[in-house]
Amino acid sequence: MGVKAVWDKIYKTLATVRTGIILLITVVIVSALGTLVLQRPTSDVDVIRRTYSPTTLLWLDRLGLTDVYHSWWFVGLLALVSLSIIFVSIERWPNAWRFYARPYRRPEAHFRAVLPNREEFSVKDAKEGIDAATRAFAKAGLKAEKIVDNSEISLYAEKHRFSVFAVYIVHASLLLIFAGGIVDALYGYRGFVAIPVGDTVNAIEMHDAKGNDFKKPMPFALRCDGAGQENYPDGTPKKWWSNLVVLKDGQVVKQKQIIVNDPLIYHGIRVYQASYGQTGKLDHAELRAAPTSGTASPQLITVAMNKPVELDADTTVTLTRFEPDFYVQDNQVFTKSESPDNPAFELKVNTKSTGKDVTLWLFPRFNNISQGPASPYTFAYADMKMANFTGLEVSFQPGQWGVWAGVLLMAFGLTVAFFMAHLRFWAMVVDDPKKGLVLWVGGACNKNKERFETRFKELTSAIREELRASGNGDGAQTKTNG
């Protein structure tokens, strides 16, 4: 079998409506699987591993079912459906264009005999009969076109001829949607990043098809200047917000406060608010510093990591270490978690005149007095604030313009397909050997037949009235619609 024969066989298979429908149903089923199976990278890796057994997850990854919309076979399926739609459209386009470009304007005898919707009226004069039909067409909102052939005059009127292209509009919309999906699958991505307030990042965290983590650089840097949470009166979260700054080559190019469903968009990249929480790092702590000698009252100071605070002209204190949930082992301080359940503070007190440093520990939950060598000050815990982070989802979907354009075009195409019909009407005076001179009126519609029959009856009633008014005939009906 030659290459041409193989191609013809492939073309004929894809150019059938049945093949297109089967492929479309397959796309719908596979897309549904993508909503039922947890997808990477939108689902947390730990959640995926807890949901599926190792063997099941291994096969889901191998089959690409954990990242359906970016798998090679899903892209191939979309391309195959698109080819089928193109071939089906090409196969049927010549007839549709011929029907649109060269409408059947003059009803021949064989056509008049078999048209289902037709009526005939006795008339005395051919010209006046045509004139009466012209006036009736106008009253019905139809612009009649006079067709002259061999001195015989007929009328032709139509509405919504372009509706014959409704199916091609829907086909074009599907092609746009599938093209957008293919572009997103090949060039789009989605990842996450957590930014502590005040920090700047230029890469997002992503997972590959096997669940391995990697970082993808962004074409700009993102800084978080603030983040917070608003609550309802009962304490449940109402909304998260983040003040974000986009930096390009060190310069601020965009700023925005984002909330859920109101992203920051820059050069096609969308940054969504996804989560909010504490980093496990300290933003600042408030301590009471009391001199070990004299009668001076304690002073309230605010300390942050590695930033000296002056207590008097000769003494400074620096917070050098913070453990949010400490425990002691072998006389060393360690942390169990990033939750600030049992904090510990390491302080360094410096005396300028002697040049000596003293290291103290403060354990608020055990004994709220600093412990360690002799120091010119003792410290007690007052309050602290943990550093917050904002969790962001960063996505780049260059094909979304195609998808949305396809959706809008499909809405238009379906509106045309369901609510507009191609209406055609003819009128012609015929010299019948048996009946004499009659005005033949016919109509046709490509859909919604029952509604069209009502409209056709309204038109014939208007013609009957015009014939009676003109005195050209009594409007007697010689033949009802067949």
Image (cartoon, rainbow, N blue to C red):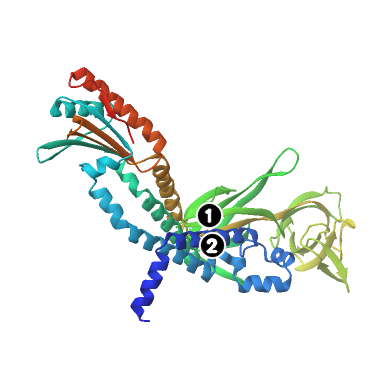
The residue closer to the viewer here, 57 or 5, is 5
Which is nearer the N-term, disc 2 or disc 1? 2
The residue to which callout 1 is attached is: 245
The image shows residue 231 at horizontal and vertical percentages of: 70, 42
The residue carrying pointer 2 sits among few (fewer than 14), some (14 to 19) or many (20 or more) residues within 10 Å by Cα, namely: some
Quarter of the picture containing the C terminus is top left
Q: Which numbered tag is attached to residue 26?
A: 2
The image shows residue 92 at horizontal and vertical percentages of: 34, 57
Residue furthest front in the image: 434
Residue furthest left in the image: 151
- SS for callout 2: helix
Instruction: Give the amino acid at mark 2.
Output: Thr
- SS for callout 1: strand
The residue carrying pointer 1 sits among few (fewer than 14), some (14 to 19) or many (20 or more) residues within 10 Å by Cα, namely: many
Is residue 19 positioned above or below 145 on the image?
A: below
Quarter of the picture containing the N terminus is bottom left
| Residue 150 in sight here | yes
| Quarter occupied by residue 394 | bottom right
